[in-house]
Amino acid sequence: MRAIGRRLSVLVLGAALGVLGREAIADDAACQAVLDAVIKQATIPVHQKILIESAAAPGKPLQSEMIHMGDTLYIQVGGQWISRPYDGQ
C-alpha cells in the first residue's frame, strides 16, 4: 500500500506542477524539490482532493479524496470511504 500511495502522490503532484511533460534528470533541482515534497507527505497528515477528467466520459470527472494520518490511509471513491493500513516509510 505504501508504494501505491507514493506513486499516486507523485502522479498528482507531478501533474499539478506540470513536470510530467518534460524529461526528468536525476540531478535536476526541480526533481529534488518534487521528491522532497512527496517524502514529506509520507511523514505528516495529508488531505488530498483528486479530480480526474477523461475524454471517455466528458463532463463526468472522477472525484476522490485521500487522507492519511499516522498509520491509516482513508480513501473515498464514489461516495464510499475505506481505510487501509499505511506505512509512510
Image (cartoon, grey):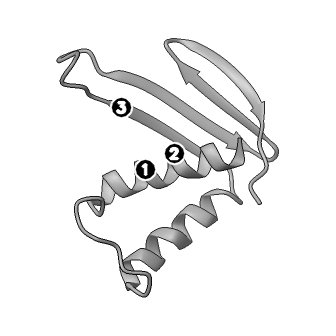
Image quadrant for the C terminus? bottom right
Horizontally, residue 47 falls left or right of residue 54, namely: right
Disc 3: which residue:
51
Q: Disc 1 or disc 3, which is closer to the eye?
A: 1
Rendered residue at 47%/79% (across/down) = 32
Dot 2 amino acid type: Leu
Secondary structure of the residue carrying numbered label 2? helix
Callout 1 touching callout 2 (CB < 8 Å)? yes
Question: Where does residue 4 sit, x and y in percent of width and height?
Answer: 61, 43
Dot 3 amino acid type: Leu
Disc 1: which residue:
11
Q: Disc 3 or disc 2, which is closer to the eye?
A: 2
Category of crowding for the residue at label 2, using alpha-carbon neighbours closer than 10 angstroms: few (below 14), some (14–19), many (at least 20): few
Secondary structure of the residue carrying numbered label 1? helix
Whichever of labels 3 and 2 marks the residue nearer the N terminus, that label is 2
Q: Is residue 50 above or below residue 29?
A: above
